Image (cartoon, coloured by chain):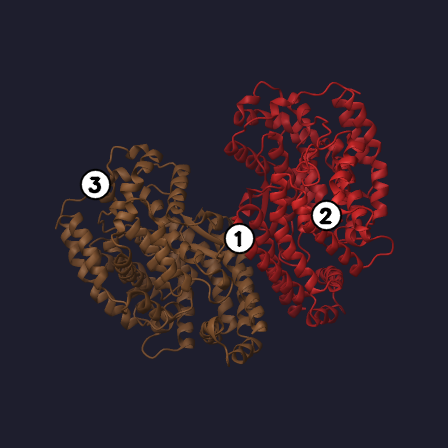
Chain colours: A red, B brown
Amino acid sequence: MEELRSRLADINALRAASSMMEWDQQTYMPPGGAEARSEHLGRLSKLAHELFTSDETLRLIEESKPGAAGDDADMLRVVSRDAYLATKLPTELVEEKSRLAAVAHEEWVKARKENDFKGFASTLERMFDIARQEAELLGYTKERYDALLDLYEEGATAADARVMFEALKEQVELVHAIAELPEVDDSILYGNWSIPAQKEFTEFLVKSIGFDMQRGRQDTAPHPFCSGWSRGDVRLTTRYGSYLPGSIFGSLHEAGHGMYEQGTPAKWDLTPLAGGVSLGLHESQSRTWENLVGRSLGFWEHFFPSMAGYFPELSGLTAKEFYRLVNKVKRSFIRTEADELTYNLHVMTRFEIESDILDGRLAVKDLPEAWNAKYQAYLGITPETDSVGCLQDVHWSMGSIGYFPTYSMGNLLSYQIWAKLENDLGDSQELIQAGRFEPILGWLQEKIYTKARQLKPKDLVLEVTGKPMGAEDYLRGLGKKYRELYEL
Amino acid sequence: MEELRSRLADINALRAASSMMEWDQQTYMPPGGAEARSEHLGRLSKLAHELFTSDETLRLIEESKPGAAGDDADMLRVVSRDAYLATKLPTELVEEKSRLAAVAHEEWVKARKENDFKGFASTLERMFDIARQEAELLGYTKERYDALLDLYEEGATAADARVMFEALKEQVELVHAIAELPEVDDSILYGNWSIPAQKEFTEFLVKSIGFDMQRGRQDTAPHPFCSGWSRGDVRLTTRYGSYLPGSIFGSLHEAGHGMYEQGTPAKWDLTPLAGGVSLGLHESQSRTWENLVGRSLGFWEHFFPSMAGYFPELSGLTAKEFYRLVNKVKRSFIRTEADELTYNLHVMTRFEIESDILDGRLAVKDLPEAWNAKYQAYLGITPETDSVGCLQDVHWSMGSIGYFPTYSMGNLLSYQIWAKLENDLGDSQELIQAGRFEPILGWLQEKIYTKARQLKPKDLVLEVTGKPMGAEDYLRGLGKKYRELYEL
């Protein structure tokens, strides 16, 4: 076990190195660094993969199993699953993907900037090819998508996702009802906002809710993300644009991910038990802090006065007016800036498209057309450019294909967990309005963050909420919020 | 050879990862990241060391030698020396040093900030212990220092350094002669200078002289340094303080290092032939751009008008007055901010102290006293605190012991190379005054940067200047400059 632990620590160091190089690539790397970065990431991921899937490591895992108990047993379960999945993929494929991702990221940045889907299409096609190969190698009973989704959300299938989206279609009616009302004028939220003020205010917010800046920091990236290589060093990113709430809710979102990572127990830091248990659970936490906390009335009753200090242009508004504006239902193009109500329709679009491309029902070259048609069907709008359409997100360029449904799972779970939290703590709006975030963070830490990867995701949901994932709490919570907001 | 190349590329990726983690540690890492960083750096350096010194790598090197010619032969010579030196040091010691360095860096930052040498002493003692062990393992004929210096400057010995410093003592007279003149009042250079203006102006300067910002960037660090992991990604750092020339000449200095790194031929990028050939040669380039270019009258005749735009407080000065001010001989405490004339006296102090500690003539606990006594003897001043005394530099905390003489070697070489450059290009001041840096950079690129590590340092000096390293050009050039400046 000692020997295994040391070997896993070597692997952890290699992965931390890759993760840091990826973070740097999206925050500070000059353009000239792309080629070498691709080479280095390829080499590091090959070394980590070789070490993890070596006979010696697999032997150490098997030999450590008999008699293992407590943390050791949990760690061996997690490592066994990871190793099982990793041995399915040959080193060459892992390396090829990592190299392609580094190149693809630069191409994607350029393509989005220049609205040039064609300049990205052949690389994207190669990325989907790799995803198909991965699915075949990992194996599945029904469809390729299942193999990929399981990597991110243990046990979930494309069929599950379809059931979930079917239930969520209940939202479409409400979206249509709201679309018939006069449009809320939120033009005051757009402007040439000071970047230093946005930086200061968003850092003030994430610190206020409990993100520990001594154990993390915030930078900027074209597509915000959260990364980290220990519970003591968690990196948020945000993006400063002309729509002020973009950086504010982006920062709160990533801070939700970040606090989950910072909440790993010290004893598990740098081990396979560290971090979040699944993408769905991770997303539930980012959405909790972004939406259930950040987009609530109490939050702005507490923070609006200081916000108006940073952005005097808004000082004519009341907290409640600001709350209404940032919850405007918009039928917009950009998922990350979508309101809660239309958000899942973006996710559904991407899920259906990924699934169609993987199974050959759609060619990559026809992607923009298919994308735009679905936006017209579900949201009643057509993206004006591919930059705000199918090129908007970074994930495909990273080879992250097959995990989008976890975004919607995160939405569902955030409400389901919140219902339980309110059951234990009482009215959350009272706490939030008073700026008392410690009881909320404390509850989430105790129930979720300190569990890290110890339980399986489905078991964790059951333990925390007393039932399997479902759409009821979500649909009820969201329906109530938006019917009140729009007086329907 | 192909197999060896791939293995060396793996090692290059591991070293790039370490180098990037070290860069991050000094630029962006939050305090909470220190412990894990130490662990990760230790693991990565262990993995690189193991891979480099493995029987398989050594076998590949030996088997590739017969029949190797051209670049391959040069690469094998370089790799053989590196491997020879690396196999002398056991993995455990390398790992221990790397771990200690990560912890020591944090302790040094704190100790310097709080002027608390005692809080750093026991860690520093451990670092010198490791240096002693390294020297014993590497072997030497005369004194421990030789073994360490050779790591940085192939073939140089402590005895060589003593001869050099003896010749440089000729400078002390001039320092004393100047000290008897009325002190130049440069108080106008101190102030609460705008950080954004310093950032913009220093980036404008380094771009103007030829540092390629598409293949690099500039950040800030408590102790400025230059790092990089490919010719396409070279990172400068600088420091913004109350003494304006600090950031200006710091940036020019690091840009000199950076342009050397950016000048590696593309075909050698990421191979053992990439980069600078020795610390002395590297320093000669940073000092060239800092002093021979940056601290010249022509440079400020060209740049002073734009500078006065960034810092209107200085617009009352003339270019020539500014030139005089930034060449003030000051007998100050901080080496990195020292004028050219007193610089070597700082280096000499540290060399003598390192040598005394390594051979047991001085105990670490008595270091501040010895340091201050030498400053009194050579410079006629005593540091007011250890923060501006023996705690000023980062190097010991990194375990970089035994290379300080290369700073003075760099000074000598910069003048020796410059004499040859002027011989080829004519009066350099005409070019500099006209802002024509391409011929200068082009000459240095052709003669030095494109050679990377292909030749041995002594052979390169001989090839470029036609003679071995000596003090004549330096003493003549410096004497002329300062006698003119002070009308002696």
Q: Mark 2 and mark 3: span between their CA atoms?
A: 63 Å
Q: Is residue B276 visible?
A: no
Residue kind at label 3, given as amino acid type: Asp
Neighbor class of circle 2 (other Cα within 10 Å; few <14, some 14-19, many 20+) is many
Work out whether residue B260 or residue A215 is closer to the camera in this orientation and state it.
B260
Left or right, B168 with respect to A316, comes to left
Q: Mark 1 and mark 2: span between their CA atoms?
A: 30 Å
Neighbor class of circle 3 (other Cα within 10 Å; few <14, some 14-19, many 20+) is few
Residue A393: % across, % down:
67, 42
- Circle 1 chain: A
Neighbor class of circle 1 (other Cα within 10 Å; few <14, some 14-19, many 20+) is many
Q: How many numbered marks appear?
A: 3
- What residue is pinned by disc 1? A33
Q: Secondary structure at mark 2?
A: helix
Q: In the rendered view, tell whether residue A434 sits above or below residue B298.
A: above
Q: In the rendered view, tell whether residue A309 sits above or below residue A260.
A: above
Q: Secondary structure at mark 1?
A: helix
- What residue is pinned by disc 2? A279
Residue kind at label 1, given as amino acid type: Gly
Q: Secondary structure at mark 3?
A: loop
